[in-house]
Amino acid sequence: MPYQAVVHPEPPDGGWGWMVVLAAFIQSALVFGVIRSFGVFFVEFVEYFDELSRRISWITSIGIAVQQFVSPVSSALSTRYGARPVVMAGGFFSSLGLFLASFATSLAHLYLCIGLLSGFGWALVFTPSMASMARYFKARRTLATGLALTGVGLSSFAFSPLFQFLVDTYAWRGALMIVAGMSSNLVVCGALIRPLTLKEDLAGPSRGDSSGMCLKKFSSLFGLHLLSHWPFMRFVLAITLINTGYFIPYVHLVARARELGFDEYKAAFLMSVAAMADLCGRLFSGWLGNCRTFHLIHILVTWTSLTGISLVLIPWGHSYPLLVTISLCYGFFSGALTPVVFSIIPEIVGIKNIFSAMGLLQMIESIGGLLGAPLSGFLKDVTGDYMASFLTAGSFILAGSLVLVTLPNFSTCLTRPAPQEPDTRMEGGGDSPLRTAPVPVEAPLPYESPPYEAILKAKKALPNS
């Protein structure tokens, strides 16, 4: 029986896609939830290894940097072999790194195990999971993304007290072993990601000059052609500017509250308020995007502008109730913009380029994340307070919103397209072994080969190819 590649005319917008959302929810919790809650181990490492705080801080800094810089590699591997094996391998490496770190005898061991090995695993997990989820949805993409990213907010609540309990009960080595066991569930999450081949994946020529074939394949896997896609590069610039100021409250808001004379419990409560609002913002933004009342770019610019304004207002929050209110606003607005960032990428580059686009975005925006906190700390040291730090952070985010305004179709209103019947006739006519059919949203998707192999076989099946 000849090979038949199942090619779906458009994202199914449901069905097995909700299982992929569940997988993305768990992986966002076990990646960024662990990173956000790693401060519990920070105190233990400072005391056990008798090192300066800034040297201990490099553990998570290296992990985050590796996670973002290696994202293009994870995207290329997912394009070639499919997201499922890549995410499963990433879950193994992240768990292995945390487990080996429990036997660390020096700070260098923690740099290698958590920073490099677990960071590499996190890179293989996050970007392919989010990109795979985006491929399963179209109209409900923002809702699905919002639901998936709530895993970060929920885990931020749960993991900090859980990790503290584990450290108090089993010491930091035993706690790391248990966290490693939790992270091994990322392998199961990867198994839930079924490959999906869309009709758009078949676009483009099937053959090329042999002399440039290797270069074209390399460029295709890593999405290097997107570097000349000016709307996408403007979007990347905007997100990089936003990322420069986005995390400043997580670094300095507690210190700002202590500077105003509030005790450590009131200062820490501000972060809890921001985390609760962050969770609500992600859910609301997902619902709003699903309503299709406004264009996604309009929603993104709105949330980005409000986030920047809330940061600019922090220096004027001299009373505790006012500071709580500003923290609430910042948490809600900053949480709301995150699902829209991931949902709008397919509208800019197309679903075919989603893996490469997310990988490049993660790598380039990490520059802003790495520069933001040191710049904020430098301004505090120079001026003596945090006013310049928060004003600069808010200015970066507002500058990012101005760049977003330059994206195509910003000035046009959203008009819902008329429903179209899927085109089951392939170009070239005739009886082709290539089969396209809509997928029932209530049924799981059939097994398919990894995207790269399925696309090649489908192209060979087309006439005149």
Image (spheres, grey):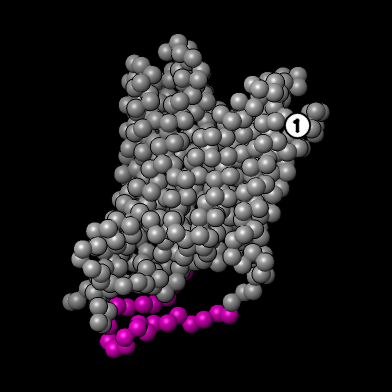
Q: Residue furthest bottom?
A: 430
Q: Amino acid at mark 1?
A: Pro
Q: Residue at x 62, y 34 (%)?
A: 248
Query: In the image, 258: left or right of 82?
Result: right
Provide residue 198's location: percent of width, then percent of height. 39, 69
Quarter of the image where one finds residue 416: bottom right
The residue to which callout 1 is attached is 315
Q: Which residues are magenta?
A: 418-441
Is 426 left or right of 1, judged from the image as shown? right
Q: Is residue 1 above or below residue 229?
A: below
Q: Residue at x 34, y 33 (%)?
A: 117
* Label 1 crowd bin: few (<14), some (14–19), many (20+), radius 10 Å: some
**Split into 4 quadrants, where in the image is the C terminus?**
bottom left
Which image quadrant for residue 323? Answer: top right
Q: Is residue 431 magenta?
A: yes
Above/below status of 335 relative to 105: below
Question: Quick check: is 452 in the magenta stretch?
Answer: no
Q: Residue 11's spot in the image, x, y percent?
A: 45, 68
- Left or right of residue 272: residue 71: left
